[in-house]
Amino acid sequence: MINGMDMLRVGIYGGTFAPIHNGHVAAAKAFMEQMKLDYLFIIPTYLPPHKQVDSSDDPWYRLKMCELAFEGVDGVVISDMEIRRGGKSYTYDTLKELQRPDTRLFLLCGTDMVLTFDTWHRFEDIFKMCYPIYVRRENDPLITNRIVAKIGEYYQKYGVMFRKVQMDPINVSSTEIRRAVKEGRDISSLVPPGVERFIHENRLYLREEQSDE
Ligand code: ATP
């Protein structure tokens, strides 16, 4: 018996994590606590081959930074399944891989992802395979209205209710961190200390970003 029930509660939090930052870490911890997860899988995506890859985009660096960010946090599993799978990283494939009869899957995404969820590969199947959860990453009231409308639409069209993880939003993005590093600004308040050290030691994010062409 697990948690007094017979189902294992497993969370999934995917992303590029280039790099992982304090917003991701806070969201992951709130997700674990509030959904009473037994395990949380942090899953960095593989970058599709048609993208120009510079050393900063190396998926193994991104994975390593996830490990550093969650060092010592019980129940968190940093998974290389999407990197090993290669090609485009579809959440549908990841859910398929983690699905088990004794497991209830919870999928976390930030607000930007909620708004575009219905463009994801096989999103209707995804709805059937997990409990979708979202977390706010900003306080903007205009976005609140859009989210409320979108969540209502998902409920009406697909009978799916997104649940919310509560936390004080940490309004930071990986893009902002890459920019700060390139400009030589301090990032110690934006990423965990191990991640900051890793970025500097490996001289990540110093070059111009490559385009997707
Ligand atoms: P980029 O700036 O490169 O687009 P990002 O900061 O949005 O990156 P991702 O790795 O693309 O980070 O995000 C992975 C997941 O984490 C997504 O579901 C995203 O919505 C969520 N997320 C990103 N930043 C935050 C934040 N500050 N708070 C909560 N969730 C976040």
Image (tube, grey):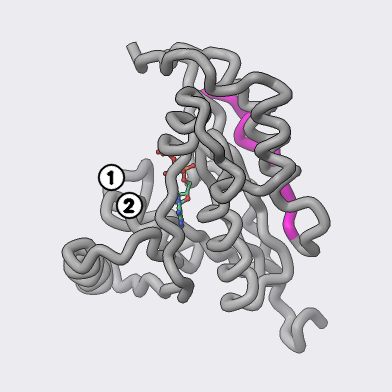
Q: Does the numbered disc 2 mark a residue whose Cβ is under 8 Å from ligand 1? A: yes
- Looking at the image, do the residues carrying marks 1 and 2 touch, with CB atoms under 8 Å apart? no
Asked whether residue 196 is in view, the answer is yes
Q: Is residue 149 left or right of residue 43?
A: left
| Residue 11: % across, % down | 61, 62
Q: Is residue 80 left or right of residue 35?
A: right
Residue 168 sits above or below residue 184 on the image: below
Question: Which quadrant would the C terminus be assigned to in this image?
Answer: top left
Callout 2: SS = helix
Residue found at x 32% / y 52%: 112
Mark 1 or mark 2, which has the lower sequence index?
A: 2
Q: Tell me, yes or no, whether the highlighted magenta stretch contains residue 135.
A: no
Name the residue beneath numbered marker 1: 119
**Residue nearest the viewer, comparing 173 with 103:** 173
Tell me where the magenta segment starts and ends, as one range. 76-87
Callout 1: SS = helix
Residue found at x 65% / y 77%: 36
Farthest residue, direction bottom? 4
| Residue 58: % across, % down | 61, 21
**Residue nearest the viewer, comparing 107 with 146:** 146
**Residue nearest the viewer, comparing 70 with 199:** 199
Q: Does the numbered disc 1 mark a residue whose Cβ is under 8 Å from ligand 1? A: no
Name the residue beneath numbered marker 2: 112
Task: Tell me where residue 17 sits by quadrant.
Answer: top right
Q: Nearer the viewer, mark 1 or mark 2?
A: 2
Question: Which quadrant would the N terminus be assigned to in this image?
Answer: bottom right
Q: Residues within 10 Å of mark 1 (few under 14, many from 20)?
A: few
Residue 137 sits above or below residue 33 on the image: above
What amino acid is found at the position of numbered circle 1 in the picture? Thr
Residue found at x 51% / y 55%: 23
| Residue 139: % across, % down | 31, 66
Gap in angstroms between the C-alphas marked 1 and 2: 12 Å
